[in-house]
Image: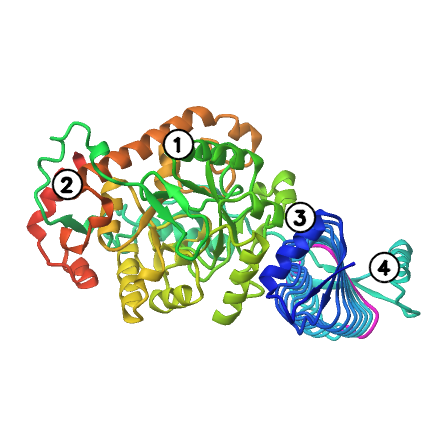
């Protein structure tokens, strides 16, 4: 057994050696661990790692196939997102052991902390002592065995899986219930205990999901929502939209759900104009070759940056909200235009990975589809905190879209109304976030840029935290961004408009003197190259397009994305509907849209007198409305509205 002494080596170098010895099939003994974080993170070789002492945060996290033995205690997030393998802890484990695991066996011979097995998908978590509160919180699958007492609110919001408690069941969580336990399950548990030489003579109580919250109680009748800006009749007060909302809520007894983004008129980039006369924007024949647009994103801290042929990316949109064919088409188009795609929050499909030249893999609180193997084949990693259409809230995916294939990728039961958590189980503050970023870097050998997606809410504070915590770049999503499913009230009334978000972000970074230490990708209602140029002028390093991409690929904007019966085959998992979609054809359409964006960026940059998009600045803009002037601090010149319309038409 190879010995690695953490009194002599930093964890980063030790993990590199662990992976190297793993590839050679050599077991490893860790000396003087002293509760250091990230021991063994990212290991995918079937070796044994013996930790002679205590381990810190995320020991054995993001691994697959290995066996870890920790002689003493383990810190927060033990075995985070393990795919398979074994972890044995001789003492106690801190909060959220076995978070998000996909099939491993984790044995804790002492007590375990709160929220054990949160968003667990498969496998077994055994605690020989007592559990703390909310064991099995949002459990999607697998089993938890507790030989001591359960702790309070055991099984809170569990969806599937089983929890077995030999001691006192102190308190059942929401939608959890006690049920009879077959003898075969009792035999299976005792065989498991014997295998790990854990003596036990008691009896178990079994806890499962009660089945009362797996779907919304009253489905909403599918209909095309009336946008807020469509008023009719003599009154703008009791208009058809207000009447429709009241009627639907009287039938369902809950908030309405829809897709897309806000339909209210809000300050946006269209309220700005260019300060110079752009009437000669078409005069240069080959303007694209005269303007430098190549952009590197994510390399400030030493990672391999994304290489963009222009300062444009695809905004995160998930396989789940969108069909496999649509994600494939977007991936193809991104490769043809030589920009980066983003998986969104639902995992990575092989079709999408094969199509996209550069792909960012996104991680959200439910850890849906999150695993070390897809991390390693990504070109960037992203921690989702929130999105502009519903800041502070988790994702929603209605049951019709949760097919067996999608459920297998995400690690959840099929056919449920999926409501993912609004926060990460292992990120409760800025300090936790730093350690989480480092875990991702450790797992991938510090090769990949790690970004954060922020829905515009408390922008000033969030941006400061993001840059201080060391993200390689920040994706800032304004209120005009869209979603596959969300509360209509939240979509229309919660958040910060994109225009205000970028201003607050720039001011926040200036306050702490850190603008040079990060990059900002602005998104949220970007429609074309004109919007892109304005975002770059206001300080963004790049912009990302979402809704405009699916419109270019055939979306008819019916705002029924959540229903799962999209007639175009875009926002559906129904094979009959999806068969209508022609990914190769739509990929060409999306590619042509991106090329039109490229031309607009080049033409306007050139018309403004620059040869490089990095020369664009605030002096190139004026405000057309008093609200935009107040938000941005730009000169108020309403007479230039006609000039802006001319530029957009060009």
> Quick check: is 239 in the magenta stretch?
no
Q: Residue at x 49, y 56 (%)?
A: 383
Magenta highlight: main SS: loop
Q: Earlier in the sequence, mark 1 or mark 4?
A: 4
In the rendered structure, are the residues bearing label 1 and label 4 in contact, judged by CB atoms less than 8 Å apart? no
In the rendered structure, are the residues bearing label 1 and label 2 in contact, judged by CB atoms less than 8 Å apart? no
Q: Earlier in the sequence, mark 1 or mark 3?
A: 3
Q: Earlier in the sequence, mark 2 or mark 4?
A: 4
Residue for badge 1: 553
Residue 82 place in picture, x, y as percent: 68, 55
Which mark's residue is nearer the viewer, 3 or 2?
2
Q: Earlier in the sequence, mark 3 or mark 2?
A: 3
> Quick check: is 160 in the magenta stretch?
yes
The magenta stretch is: 157-169
Cα distance in 3D space between marks 2 and 4: 70 Å
Per the rendering, the mark at residue 413 is: 3
For mark 4, give the secondary structure.
Answer: loop
Which mark's residue is nearer the viewer, 1 or 3?
1
Name the colouring of the figure: rainbow
Residue 270 place in picture, x, y as percent: 21, 48
In the figure, 158 relative to 148: above or below? above
Residue pushed farthest right? 201
Say left or right for 318 vs 276.
Answer: right
**Is residue 622 among what the camera can see?**
no
Per the rendering, the mark at residue 645 is: 2
For mark 3, give the secondary structure.
Answer: loop
Crowding at dot 1, Cα within 10 Å, few <14 / some 14-19 / many 20+, comes out as many
For mark 1, give the secondary structure.
Answer: loop
Per the rendering, the mark at residue 633 is: none
For mark 2, give the secondary structure.
Answer: helix
Cα distance in 3D space between marks 1 and 4: 51 Å
Q: Earlier in the sequence, mark 4 or mark 3?
A: 4
């Amino acid at each position: 057994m190879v010995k690695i002494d953490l009194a002599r080596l930093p964890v980063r170098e030790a993990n590199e050696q662990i992976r190297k010895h793993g590839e050679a099939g050599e077991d490893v003994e860790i000396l003087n661990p002293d509760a250091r974080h990230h021991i063994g993170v990212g290991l995918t070789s079937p070796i044994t790692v013996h930790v002679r002492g205590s381990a810190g945060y995320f020991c054995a996290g993001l691994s697959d196939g290995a066996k870890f033995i920790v002689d003493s205690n383990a810190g927060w997030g033990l075995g985070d997102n393990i795919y398979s393998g074994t972890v044995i802890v001789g003492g106690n484990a801190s909060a959220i052991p076995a978070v998000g695991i996909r099939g491993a066996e984790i044995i804790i011979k002492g007590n375990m902390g709160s929220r054990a097995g949160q968003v667990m998908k498969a496998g077994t978590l055994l605690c020989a002592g007592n559990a703390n509160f909310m064991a099995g919180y949002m459990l999607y699958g697998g089993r938890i065995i507790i030989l001591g007492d359960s702790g309070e609110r055991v099984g809170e919001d569990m969806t599937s899986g089983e929890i077995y408690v030999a001691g006192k069941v102190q308190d059942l969580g929401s939608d959890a219930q006690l049920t009879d336990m077959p003898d075969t399950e009792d035999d299976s548990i005792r065989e498991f205990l014997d295998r790990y030489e854990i003596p036990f003579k008691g009896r178990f109580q079994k806890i499962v999901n009660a089945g009362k919250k797996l779907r919304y109680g009253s489905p909403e009748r599918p209909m095309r929502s009336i946008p807020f800006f469509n008023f009719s009749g003599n009154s703008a007060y009791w208009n058809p939209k207000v009447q429709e909302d009241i009627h639907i809520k009287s039938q369902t007894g809950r908030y309405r759900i829809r897709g897309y983004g806000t339909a209210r008129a809000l300050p946006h980039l269209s309220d700005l104009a260019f300060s110079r006369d752009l009437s000669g924007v078409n005069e240069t024949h080959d303007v694209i070759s005269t303007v430098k647009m190549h952009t590197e994103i994510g390399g400030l801290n030493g990672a391999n940056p994304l290489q963009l042929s222009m300062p444009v990316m695809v905004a995160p949109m998930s396989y789940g909200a969108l069909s496999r064919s649509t994600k494939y088409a977007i991936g193809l188009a991104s490769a043809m235009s030589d920009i980066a795609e983003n998986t969104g929050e639902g995992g990575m499909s092989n079709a999408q990975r094969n199509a996209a030249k550069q792909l960012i893999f996104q991680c959200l609180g439910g850890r849906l589809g999150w695993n070390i193997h897809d991390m390693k084949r990504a070109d960037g990693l992203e921690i989702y905190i929130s999105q502009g259409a519903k800041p502070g809230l988790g994702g929603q995916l209605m049951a019709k879209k949760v097919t067996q294939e999608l459920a297998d990728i995400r690690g959840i039961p099929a056919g449920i109304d999926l409501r993912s958590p609004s926060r990460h189980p292992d990120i409760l503050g800025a300090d936790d976030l730093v350690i989480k970023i480092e875990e991702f870097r450790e797992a991938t050998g510090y090769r990949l840029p790690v970004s954060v997606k922020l829905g515009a809410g408390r922008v000033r504070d969030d941006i400061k935290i993001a840059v201080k915590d060391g993200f390689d770049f920040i994706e800032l999503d304004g209120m005009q961004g869209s979603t596959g499913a969300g509360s209509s009230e939240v979509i229309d009334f919660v958040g910060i408009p994109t225009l205000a978000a970028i201003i607050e972000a720039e001011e926040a970074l200036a306050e702490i003197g850190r603008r040079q230490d990060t990059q900002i990708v602005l998104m949220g209602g970007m429609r074309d190259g004109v919007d892109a140029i304005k975002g770059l002028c206001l300080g963004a390093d790049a912009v990302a397009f979402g809704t405009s991409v699916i419109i270019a690929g055939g979306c008819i904007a019916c705002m029924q994305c959540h229903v799962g019966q999209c007639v175009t085959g875009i926002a559906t998992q129904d094979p009959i509907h999806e068969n209508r979609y022609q990914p190769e054809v739509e990929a060409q359409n999306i590619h042509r849209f991106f090329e039109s964006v490229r031309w607009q960026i080049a033409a306007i940059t050139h018309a403004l007198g620059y040869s490089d998009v990095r020369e664009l600045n605030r002096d190139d803009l004026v405000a057309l409305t008093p609200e935009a002037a107040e938000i941005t601090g730009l000169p108020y010149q309403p007479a230039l509205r006609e000039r802006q319309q001319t530029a957009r038409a060009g």
